[in-house]
Image: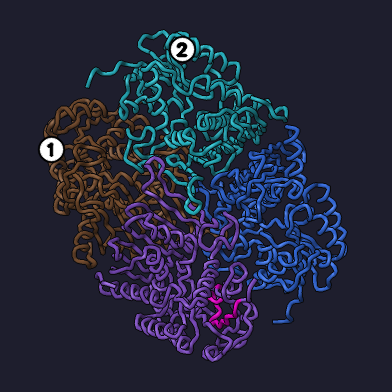
Chain colours: A brown, B blue, C purple, D cyan
Amino acid sequence: MGDAPARLGVGMVGYSFMGAAHSQAWRTAPRFFDLPLRPSMTALAGRNRDNVTVAADKLGWDSVETDWRTLLTRDDVDLIDICTPGDTHAEIAIAALDAGKHVLCEKPLANSVAEAEEMVAAAERAAARGVLSMVGFTYRRVPAIQLARQLVADGRIGTVRHVRAQYLQDWLSDASAPLSWRMDKDKAGSGALGDIGAHIIDLTQFITGESVTGVSGMLETFVSERPVATEFAGLAGKGGDEVGPVTVDDAACFLARMSGGGVGVFEATRFAQGRKNAIRIEINGSRGSVAFDFEDMNVLHFFDAEEPAATAGFRRIVVTEADHAYIASWWPPGHALGYEHAFTHQVVDLVGAVAAGEQPAPSFADGLAVQKVLDAVERSAEKGAWLDV
Amino acid sequence: MGDAPARLGVGMVGYSFMGAAHSQAWRTAPRFFDLPLRPSMTALAGRNRDNVTVAADKLGWDSVETDWRTLLTRDDVDLIDICTPGDTHAEIAIAALDAGKHVLCEKPLANSVAEAEEMVAAAERAAARGVLSMVGFTYRRVPAIQLARQLVADGRIGTVRHVRAQYLQDWLSDASAPLSWRMDKDKAGSGALGDIGAHIIDLTQFITGESVTGVSGMLETFVSERPVATEFAGLAGKGGDEVGPVTVDDAACFLARMSGGGVGVFEATRFAQGRKNAIRIEINGSRGSVAFDFEDMNVLHFFDAEEPAATAGFRRIVVTEADHAYIASWWPPGHALGYEHAFTHQVVDLVGAVAAGEQPAPSFADGLAVQKVLDAVERSAEKGAWLDV
Amino acid sequence: MGDAPARLGVGMVGYSFMGAAHSQAWRTAPRFFDLPLRPSMTALAGRNRDNVTVAADKLGWDSVETDWRTLLTRDDVDLIDICTPGDTHAEIAIAALDAGKHVLCEKPLANSVAEAEEMVAAAERAAARGVLSMVGFTYRRVPAIQLARQLVADGRIGTVRHVRAQYLQDWLSDASAPLSWRMDKDKAGSGALGDIGAHIIDLTQFITGESVTGVSGMLETFVSERPVATEFAGLAGKGGDEVGPVTVDDAACFLARMSGGGVGVFEATRFAQGRKNAIRIEINGSRGSVAFDFEDMNVLHFFDAEEPAATAGFRRIVVTEADHAYIASWWPPGHALGYEHAFTHQVVDLVGAVAAGEQPAPSFADGLAVQKVLDAVERSAEKGAWLDV
Amino acid sequence: MGDAPARLGVGMVGYSFMGAAHSQAWRTAPRFFDLPLRPSMTALAGRNRDNVTVAADKLGWDSVETDWRTLLTRDDVDLIDICTPGDTHAEIAIAALDAGKHVLCEKPLANSVAEAEEMVAAAERAAARGVLSMVGFTYRRVPAIQLARQLVADGRIGTVRHVRAQYLQDWLSDASAPLSWRMDKDKAGSGALGDIGAHIIDLTQFITGESVTGVSGMLETFVSERPVATEFAGLAGKGGDEVGPVTVDDAACFLARMSGGGVGVFEATRFAQGRKNAIRIEINGSRGSVAFDFEDMNVLHFFDAEEPAATAGFRRIVVTEADHAYIASWWPPGHALGYEHAFTHQVVDLVGAVAAGEQPAPSFADGLAVQKVLDAVERSAEKGAWLDV
């Protein structure tokens, strides 16, 4: 068997929705994949000792800290996994990298381009010392998305002409859904735009290998005041009588120009009744098309225009074959993966990169690229005019 | 332009649902296709003079007869189109053929094997004199079905292993839906079995080029008494207080052996709530599969197992390309055909065969082949045992 | 039976794609629907006598004219049906209306706002004299679209928040597809924008009952030169060695503001590989959503947010029930309608309006409203800024 | 917080495909659900010490045994989880129950009715002493299946008339796919019938709350000889030159009568090219229908015939709402679960039952009920006649 792999001590900050997903990934990755390092769920940080203790017990972390800074001083922690709201990313990530800890940072990378640029600078400083960083655009690691990227890279759809990308949710359609930090500009930076729009921007840039070069944006807040949540009640809990302002966008739409000459239409919203987490990406090229919908996440649709017209059609590829990315470590064909599997794949790739001393993707620079698009969309929406990214 | 095509005088018997569909086909075929004969809608026959006169005016027939036998004596009638219930098919068809008239007969060919055999004998006698006959298994002429048949014939799915065929309707689910001739064994021969089961048997034999050789059947009548319709009220009208017996099956299911070694599962029912006219045929072969659902009638799904596993998937072929059967005469790609187009195609093929003096398909012999399967299913269901066809 | 309905003499100008569709509608409408007037296919006009004669014979018109102006002088012509390219609409329609003929004019109403405004003025003058006019936004008459409109009007989706409309074709994806009048700005006015984008603008305004009030547009021509067609070769025939310029857009995308406070994202393209005629409209409201795709044209998807969460879901309504618009005159449930049925419905509605002396919808004013949006999109795309409509 | 839950020591036998799935479930259940007992992955048993040691390390088991009997003697093991081929189930399960260990046994319960009956007897003896047993029909615990069962139980589809159940795989379509224990009658009992047919029988009985009372079966072996696998190569690995006989069915089809008066059509095959793990169940009742396809496992289709015809349609319910079974412990709406989540739910329910001292479902008696149907299908297929179960 050879030597057992060396240990990789992980310290995580935050333990809400993303914390639960990341924990499952850290627990699961070594059980299905042969990792070059053995992740250890060393410590969980949170401000409230009681809460963080309960969470650590539930999620499987060996110890707790009430100040994330303490994680940076622990010798048994090699990597910091940041699962907090966006307003804290820059401070934690930069400090961690400067302290010589590898960093996995949830998306969006930051709440502003300026912060993101500082983070990229920190990542570059750190990389020079062999300290690595990655931003958590997890959906890249859905096998169907990997296949889409591969088909585009292999030239199977030719030159990209159209990108059609939507991220549709409906949990704010009800005007009585309560306020959360995700509707507070100070915490979240933006609303649907940064929270979910960021994903479809990254996915587009990842699948096409191109970048968004110009945008015309439109932001809308349909419900400007909401009840203040009386206690934490999940994404769509109920609030009380007190109301507070929504300071972010409910929906964000933008047109785009791609670096390869194609055009794009993007839409992110929390007001699409009946669409729960519909991440839809369709890319039309000169030789074919790919189409994905997260509501059917194990499937990629592929149209090959090189086929004779009589038998051409979108192929519904069930992306659960051993030849597909990550699948050989899971189940036989047709046995679906779920939402959290992409987080496990993220851990696999990150641990592989750390072991190899190589820059993992998506890098902080990739995160900054997304941030710049978000920023251009916001400024464009304000001006009512096209802007270069 | 050459000479104008010669005239083909058509006399139709019956003017209900099928009569309306056939009339639209006779009217439409010459407007979209270049026919070698010019059909003339010469005469419509029905027992009630007032009703048949109204119908002829509405449907576009030039004259009426109150006795179908008169049609056989008219020199301006070359072809008899039989759109009446199954109990009258044998008498009309045999008389017409013996009178030297070509015949198009609605399905099922007859209400019994014995009748169907007499019809086949009459057809053979007639054919020897150049008088032709065809049975109306119209769904063969849906372009997606034609493509399925072509793919199988071309070996694209290899040896047939599985046939999975369903014809699902729901118009009798409601126990208060009234009696009609379709629930009367004397008129209809059988219920779901002959009315709609006949279609999926024919489609299966057509697409595979094989025959059903043995069956194990099950018939069921869920609702044994229904209100007598106070007047004609369409397929799912309402009845009055008087009730009468349902003397046919509401649903028919059977297992089958195919002549090429494959196995089949068939189901025909009028009790599948929510399925309106769902004709579903899936055929799995050693090299691939085809799948069709009439609820999406312009589409064929094709799986090619010769493709690499990573990009294999059912192709959703939108069967509206100029390369597909019949389509070049209709609209550009993506412009859907509907239910009655298959009747127009039936006219096109029939007129072509008559002009060429060639046997059209499906022949009465094909209709008899279906009848024998229906008969074997009924007898098998009664005995509770497998029977050869 | 009462008296036979009076005659309505129709003269049609043009006999290409739209001419064939309109002819089928004029032939078919009286066979399935009880019309208050009996349409007569009186005369077909076209410049080349030989060609128009062949076409009239094929399509079923009783006579021909080589100058459309002559139609206006014929007493046996009551209505002019204009199926020519957009650059001729204004002249023909205005002359016809001024001559006292009712007018059905294909979309887009005109090639410019100025022309459309003159047409509206002519329509108003004519209406004062009981002479009526309609523009051919046929897709409104697909039964699933009618149901969508009804559900919105009934408040079933609440306040409209999102419109997501696409019209996707792929017949120009191949750079060797030849030039046609549809790629010539002088003839067509614009490319994908006016040809197919016009449909989704009209459908959106029809379904929502709202208007587009502001836009930010983007136009793109991916292939700027194409082979000149050596002869007419259908929408996607092959050309020769000579090339000519494409002077219209290949694709048009725009963001929109709706009069009710919602936002819209529109896209029209002939470069979406694998999408043949995909008209997709999804509308999300505060209480529900409707979604339509012409690739499955007999279906409407409806999400009712008033249902309990545990059983809420998009309903796939097969719009072939007797309760649905137009269906009672056709077939039993589940028997699909096709592309041309909407043209038949257009005739039904137009004839009904003429008989009643009432303004049919969509009016020339509705056509002008679409034209203004098209115009605003073009100007916005040029300026790179939002514009009011 | 109260006291920490008591420990439940688990010993597992077998560590192949099912062993990996069960391990993930034991690891994951306590991380997402509040369990009344804390499962401990105490010991893994397998015959080869090296292999079982590697597996235990990989899958997270604390110790190993090379004889499963030793597990029964360990005080720290409270529950035996049997993940071995069917020929060993009876011996292990009976011994374990008699030794006072709770048992979770993979399906099918046994390879014969006689064995299954002995197991039920052992389960009853054990239950009298508070020792519990469960059979692993995991698919019951897919949330969409739970919802189907709930809707039927609530009367939402009325009286069951049709069951249409298929389990379609294609991994043996290729005649060169090698032999495995799953094609060996001595190990597996039967082929597609028991391996996958068992699931759709159990699911049908579970969802409807009815039992299969009579069957007419057909078994087929399409490929009677296959290469002997040179080494373990997964479900569809490649074999060498040596060949051996396939002694089980490749496909099994049967008609059925249900205890409530409905009829059923069942099909299980490993030869449906392009269908990877398609478990499809549709149930039509007098008031509605439910339909499920594991290829889209987070979705249930529900047709409510009580809706007005104009707005009735199959609802595509995305079964990821907090109101759906198990979901509140996972992710927000629209975030899909995958194949292995049902195993986690199985652990949750089993641990809950053990803690409560209540019989978990499905019981060994439920497993025996399935076994009797399998047995009747085999005997019916041999006789060519209907048989009561």
Q: Is residue A24 above or below residue C224?
A: above
Instruction: Give the left or right position of residue D321, taking residue A367 as reference.
Output: right
Look at the numbered disc 1 and give the secondary structure of its residue. Answer: loop
The magenta stretch spans residue C17: yes
Q: Which residue is mark 1?
A: A99
**Which is nearer the eye, B389 or A230?**
A230
Instruction: Give the left or right position of residue D318, taking residue B306 as reference.
Output: left
Q: CA distance from mark 2 to mark 1?
A: 59 Å
- What residue range appears in magenta? C5-21
Counting labels gives 2
Note whether residue C290 is visible: yes
Q: Position of residue B132 (x, y in %)?
A: 81, 63
Q: Amino acid at mark 1?
A: Ala
In which quadrant will I find the C terminus of chain D?
top right
**Which is nearer the eye, D223 or C350?**
C350
Q: Which numbered marker is on residue D127?
A: 2
**Which is nearer the eye, B75 or A75?**
B75
Q: Amino acid at mark 2?
A: Ala
The magenta stretch spans residue D299: no
Tell which tag, 2 or 1, sits nearer the viewer.
2
Host chain of mark 2 = D
Instruction: Give the left or right position of residue D172, taking residue B363 as reference.
Output: left
In which quadrant will I find the N terminus of chain D?
top left
Look at the numbered disc 2 and give the secondary structure of its residue. Answer: helix
Host chain of mark 1 = A
Q: Residue furthest front?
A: B241
User: How packed is label 2: few (under 14 Cα within 10 Å), some, or many (20 or more)?
Assistant: some
| Residue beneath the point at 57% across and 27% down | D211
